[in-house]
Image (cartoon, helix red, strand yellow):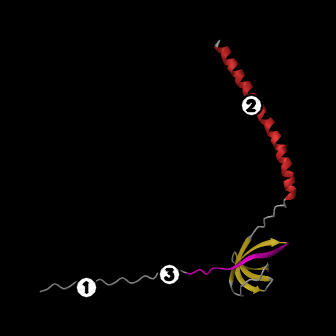
Amino acid sequence: MNRLMVIVVGLVFLFTSAAIAADKPAAAPKAAPAKAATAAPAAEKTAPAPVKVAKMKATGVVTEVTDAVLKIDVKVKGKVEAKEFTLEKPVKAKVGDKVTVIYAEKDGKMVAMKVAKAAKKVAMKKKIAPLPEPAAAPEPAK
């Protein structure tokens, strides 16, 4: 009797789990075509996503500057390397200034997106005031 009861409960569990599993995939495909149908017209209306441009950074000393071109000398592993950037807009930098250039490569050219003067490092020196001399102890009275 116990064995028969265990078999019946096992079969009921097996059939209910099979029925639940069969229902889930049937519901998912119905929703998927509806999303695909609404997504297709929306994709046609919107413009393609803009391509992200990798931004790079270089810091060096300005050797030449014009309205369209900026040339700097960059130290790389102990060697000085000259880099030339095409400017989108004129910059306020002079020959000899240390600048940081944020740039991207477009059509094989390095195009400067932002040019900023590099901050000067200021060495912080602590001034230590000399300690006051201890007051002389009064001499004992005789």
Looking at the image, residue 80 lies above or below residue 14: below
Q: Which secondary structure lies at badge 2?
A: helix
Q: Which of marks 2 and 1 is nearer the N terminus?
A: 2
Q: Are marks 1 and 3 in contact (CB under 8 Å)?
A: no
Residue at image mark 2: 20
Which one is closest to the eye, mark 2 or mark 3?
Answer: 2
Residue 7: where, in percent of width, then height? 69, 18
Q: Quadrant of the N terminus?
A: top right
Q: Which secondary structure lies at badge 1?
A: loop
Instruction: Give me the residue at 86% from left, 52% from top.
Output: 40
The kind of residue tagged 2 is: Ile
Q: Residue pushed farthest top?
A: 1
Res. 13 in view: yes
Marks 2 and 3, Cα distance to the nearest angstrom?
76 Å
Numbered mark located on residue 115 in the image:
none
Residue 41: where, in percent of width, then height? 87, 53
The kind of residue tagged 3 is: Lys
The kind of residue tagged 1 is: Ala
Which residues fall within the magenta stretch? 107-122
Q: Nearer the viewer, residue 55 or 42?
A: 42
Q: Nearer the viewer, residue 78 or 69?
A: 69
Marks 1 and 3, Cα distance to the nearest angstrom?
33 Å
Residue 110: where, in percent of width, then height? 80, 75
Q: Earlier in the sequence, mark 1 or mark 3?
A: 3
Quadrant housing residue 142:
bottom left
Q: Nearer the viewer, residue 35 or 58?
A: 35
Q: Which of marks 2 and 3 is nearer the N terminus?
A: 2
Residue at image mark 3: 125
* Residue 113 within the magenta-colored segment of the rendering: yes
